[in-house]
Image (cartoon, rainbow, N blue to C red):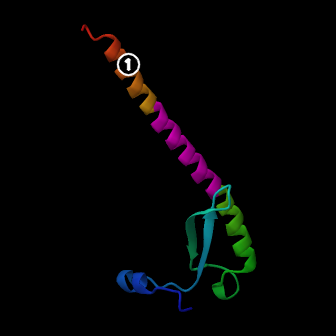
Amino acid sequence: DPRFNAEVDLITGYKTQSILCLPIKNHKEEVVGVAQAINKKCGEDKVFTEQDEKDFSSYLAFSGIVLHNAQLYETSQLENRRNQAQACTVFIADQDPM
């Protein structure tokens, strides 16, 4: 496959024999990442099958949900810190003896 970049194999000495690479999508079906499985260890010819692709895709649907939830949590934490900083600023301003 001409899309395969063997540079990592050359650098690491690893031998890639098969790859299954699929997008990780969010709840809006936007691609937010990519995941890959390398060198299937079992099965006929140790080649990834359509069933492997379906199974991996199902797993990645949950990965997309997890990534979205992590982003929501991070946004919530940042907003909480921002609100705390504003509250401290208001409190300091209210305590100004001038």
Q: Is residue 43 above or below residue 70?
A: below
Q: Is residue 71 above or below residue 24?
A: above
Quadrant of the rendered image containing residue 38: bottom right
For the record, the magenta segment spans: 63-80
Q: Residue furthest front?
A: 98
Name the residue tied to disc 1.
90
Q: Image check: 91 left or right of 28?
A: left
Residue 51 spot, x, y in % from top left = 75, 75
**Residue sitting nearer the eye, 55 or 97:** 97
Quadrant of the rendered image containing residue 18: bottom right
Tell me the element at label 1. helix
Residue 33 spot, x, y in % from top left = 55, 64
Q: Which residue is pictured at 72% across the width and 68% down the height?
A: 55
Q: Is residue 89 above or below residue 19?
A: above
Amino acid carrying mark 1 in the image:
Val
Q: Which residue is pictured at 55% across the width and 86% down the height?
A: 17
**Residue sitting nearer the eye, 21 or 55:** 21
Quarter of the image that includes the C terminus: top left
Residue 85 spot, x, y in % from top left = 38, 27
Quarter of the image that includes the N terminus: bottom right
